[in-house]
Amino acid sequence: MVRTLAVFLGIFGIVCRGIAICHIILGPAAIPGSVPVNSIMDSEDRFYATLFFGFGAAMMWCALDISRRSAPMLVLMAVFFAGGVARLISIAQVGLPSPFFQLMTGLELLIPPVCWLWRRVALQRPLAGLGQAG
């Protein structure tokens, strides 16, 4: 189970880095259904893409030794989950995005808890911060 989780996290990190590279190279044109934006929004998209590239690299690093790097993996998953929550805030304030981004929101809210539980079972350790030894 640890190996399968490691493979999943490695692939997840590669996908994140690939998405980031597309945004760095293409800018907002990499976004399905995007519209032309001004230079400020283009700059922001490319800047945040570099952070997502780092996120993917960090996830790949965690995948190399989950037993020792599960705490950083949990933090990264919390950040990814927070991205899904940010999309919910956008939905509340602006309305529903395209079905593609509704799917992305669902994945951002689903993948972290699945990985948290997967990690718990794979390492046979309780989740940290829930009043149990970790």
Image (cartoon, helix red, strand yellow):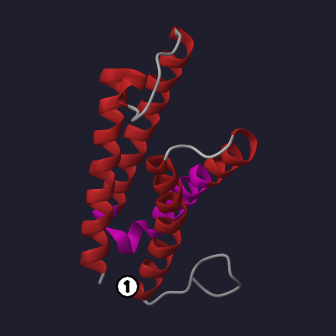
Q: Is residue 122 magenta?
A: no
Q: Callout 1, which amino acid?
A: Ala
Residue 62, image x, y percentages: 36, 60
Residue 117, image x, y percentages: 49, 81
34 relative to 109, above or below: above
Give the quadrant of residue 64: bottom left
Q: How crowded is mark 1: few (under 14 residues within 10 Å), some or many (20 or more)?
A: some
Q: Residue at x 53, y 54 (%)?
A: 105
Residue 35, image x, y percentages: 47, 22
Quadrant that contains the C terminus: bottom right
Q: Residue at x 57, y 58 (%)?
A: 81
The residue indicated by pointer 1 is 122
Of 130 and 105, nearer the camera is 105
Q: Which residue is drawn at 43% across and 46% down?
A: 55
Range of residues picked out in magenta: 63-84
112 relative to 123, above or below: above
